[in-house]
Image (tube, rainbow, N blue to C red):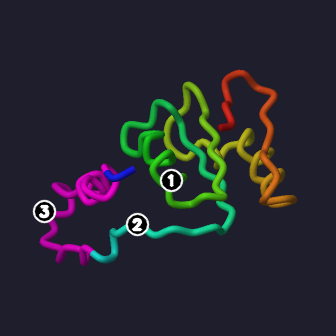
């Protein structure tokens, strides 16, 4: 998807205005350039997270071809850090190449 490369710097600067107030030097553009990886990764997102929207997982999945995405409906930031996330983390760590499974209608694996 060609639009990822043209928009990636803007999208990854969620807190640019907050960082600007501290007069911190900008991160080198190369640091933010996407790269491809086949390493298995489990990505979790809450659909109500105002800072890191689920679209970020979709973008990372594009570049991390063995990643799995878990969407927690009605949850905000770090949903995998709660009890329900333990199930998916365990499944993933037991077999990182096997698709994790959800039996909860409010937790979608895709």
Element type where label 1 sits in the image: helix
Q: Looking at the rendering, which quadrant does residue 25 occupy?
A: bottom left
Q: Position of residue 10 (x, y in %)?
A: 23, 54
Q: Are marks 1 and 2 in contact (CB under 8 Å)?
A: yes
Give the residue number, with chain letter if any, for mark 2.
34
Asked if residue 104 is among those painted magenta in the image, a careful observer would answer no
Give the residue number, with chain letter if any, for mark 1.
62
First in residue order: circle 3 vs circle 1: 3
Residue at 68% x, 37% y is 109
Element type where label 3 sits in the image: loop
Residue at 66% x, 31% y is 108
In the image, the segment drawn in magenta is 3-29
First in residue order: circle 1 vs circle 2: 2
Q: Position of residue 82 (x, y in %)?
A: 67, 43
Give the residue number, with chain letter if any, for mark 3.
21
Q: Looking at the rendering, which quadrant does residue 24 occupy?
A: bottom left
Q: Is residue 53 left or right of residue 25?
A: right
Q: Residues within 10 Å of mark 1 (few under 14, many from 20)?
A: some
């Amino acid at each position: 998807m060609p639009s990822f490369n043209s928009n990636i710097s803007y999208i990854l600067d969620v807190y640019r205005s907050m960082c600007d107030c501290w007069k911190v030097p900008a991160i080198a553009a190369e640091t933010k350039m996407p790269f491809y990886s086949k390493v298995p990764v489990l990505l979790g997102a809450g659909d109500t997270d105002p800072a890191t929207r689920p679209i970020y997982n979709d973008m990372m999945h594009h570049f991390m071809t063995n990643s799995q995405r878990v969407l927690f409906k009605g949850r905000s930031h770090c949903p995998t850090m709660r009890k329900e996330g333990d199930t998916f983390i365990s499944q993933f760590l037991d077999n990182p190449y096997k698709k994790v499974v959800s039996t909860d209608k409010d937790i979608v694996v895709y």
